[in-house]
Image (cartoon, helix red, strand yellow):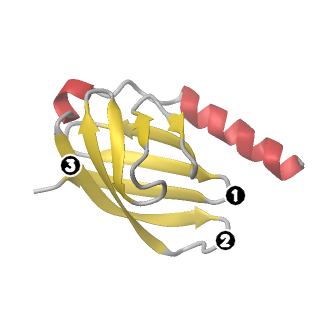
Amino acid sequence: MKAFLQQTITVFQAASMVCCLSSQAIAGQIWAGAGQIISGSGQGASVTLTLDINGNQATIVNGPSSGSIVSLNGGITAAGQWVFRGSDSELQVTLYTNSQQTVFYKLSPAR
């Protein structure tokens, strides 16, 4: 129970630090990149993620919960809690999975 509470607190802290993304600047683009499982089962493993950004929403093209739509303000899919931070040239995505993993991705516009 203590670990669950610590992860929940971490999620809320991360969500409270999310800066407003300029959805107009990144909208209408495919973003792709690599990431790493930074805690939990499989720690250290490399992973990939591809998102199709449309307005203030991201469709997960390739990655956990493929096909799901999540708000760039953060949201929950079957995979877990998503947190987005970024700029026009880089999108940082943190996924706190339901299986107690933390996955961090750095994405850039796909060419």
Q: Which residue position is annotated with label 3?
A: 30
Q: How busy is the neighbourhood of tag 1: few (under 14 within 10 Å), some, or many (20 plus)?
A: some
Q: Residue at the location (67% across, 41% down)?
A: 10
Residues at marks 2 and 1, CA–CA distance in whole angstroms: 8 Å
What SS does tag 1 mark? loop
Residues at marks 2 and 3, CA–CA distance in whole angstroms: 29 Å
The one nearer the camera, 78 or 29, is 78
Screen quadrant of the C terminus? bottom left
Specify which label sits upstream in the sequence, 2 or 3.
3
Q: Which residue position is annotated with label 2?
A: 41
Q: Which residue position is annotated with label 1?
A: 100
The amino acid pointed to by label 1 is: Gln
Specify which label sits upstream in the sequence, 2 or 1.
2
Residues at marks 1 and 3, CA–CA distance in whole angstroms: 28 Å
In the rendered image, the residue lying farthest to the front is 67
Residue 32: x and y in percent read 27, 57
Q: Are marks 2 and 1 in contact (CB under 8 Å)?
A: yes
Q: Is residue 96 above or below residue 47?
A: above
User: Does residue 105 appear to the left or right of 97 in the view shown?
Assistant: left
- Which label is found at residue 33? none
Q: Residue at the location (52% across, 58% down)?
A: 103
Specify which label sits upstream in the sequence, 1 or 3.
3
The one nearer the camera, 80 or 86, is 80
